[in-house]
Image (spheres, rainbow, N blue to C red):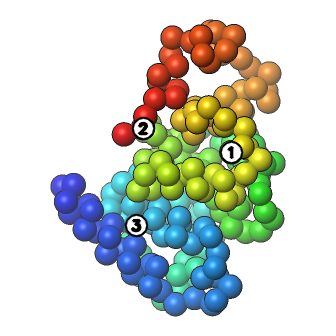
Amino acid sequence: MNALDRMEVRATVLSGLLGAGSTPALLNDPNRPLLASMIAGQAAGQGCLPAHLGLGPARFSELLARLFPGTPVFLVRREVEEIPELDDLRKLLLDHRAHPGESAEWMADIVATACAGRDHLWQDLGLANRDELSQLMRLNFAPLADQNVGDMKWKKFLYKQFCAAEGIYVCPAPSCGECADHPKCFGPET
């Protein structure tokens, strides 16, 4: 599928998902458009997530039934690489969630699963751009997102937080501003 076809699939799926019926309370869920963007990206072959976004088939079906009822979704089947720190990343996210509830738990599982990908986190999630990821982080994990004062790339930031919590310091410089890899951590994500 070429880039134009991907854009067309993404737009069609996104429109269908956001136009799907739902209860008024669920329509107001701020994660709904972000989840729709991820699902549309996955349907267009973008991202690294498995077809169930890392939620497992039952929880993913529940998410669809609750937020996008009656909408058929055909996602790309792919295997995601197993990472040993998956549960720790999930815990880091859940320990910093901005609100209780299933929606934040879904996002923690999805984001932690996408950390196994090899691209920028927003790309691995199948989102349209980094701004959507920043919105996701602020909505769901505000106490953690507020700590990213230098606008570090999200996957690097999450791993840095995880490593610091474990007492693992792998950065060669005492501060990011002095590090030779500064552009890799804080540069634009295109």
Q: Where is 67 relative to 59, above or below?
A: below
Residue 23 point in image, percent of width and height: 63, 90
Residue type of the residue flagged with mark 2: Glu
Name the disc covering residue 40, or none: 3
Question: CA separation, marks 2 and 1?
Answer: 17 Å
Query: Which of the image's four quarters has the N terminus?
Result: bottom left
Residue on which the image places disc 2: 189
Give the structural element (helix, strand or loop) at label 3: helix
Q: Where is 20 relative to 146, above or below?
A: below
Residue on which the image places disc 1: 145
Q: Where is 189 relative to 66, above or below?
A: above
Is the residue marked by circle 3 packed among few (<14), some (14-19), or many (20+) residues within 10 Å? Answer: many
In front of the other: label 1 or label 3?
A: 1
98 or 118: nearer the viewer: 98
Is the residue marked by circle 1 packed among few (<14), some (14-19), or many (20+) residues within 10 Å? Answer: many
Query: Residue placed at 62% from the left, 31% from the top?
Result: 150
Query: Which of the image's four quarters has the C terminus?
Result: top left
Query: Residue placed at 77% from the left, 68% from the top?
Result: 101
141 or 117: nearer the viewer: 141
Q: Which of the marked residues, 2 or 3, is nearer the chain's N terminus?
A: 3
Query: Residue placed at 77% from the left, 47% from the top?
Result: 143
Give the structural element (helix, strand or loop) at label 1: helix
Q: Which of the marked residues, 1 or 3, is nearer the chain's N terminus?
A: 3
Residue type of the residue flagged with mark 3: Ala
Residue 183 point in image, percent of width and height: 47, 22
Residue 41 point in image, percent of width and height: 39, 61
Question: CA separation, marks 2 and 3?
Answer: 20 Å
In the picture, measured across the screen, residue 6 lies left or right of residue 64, that is: left
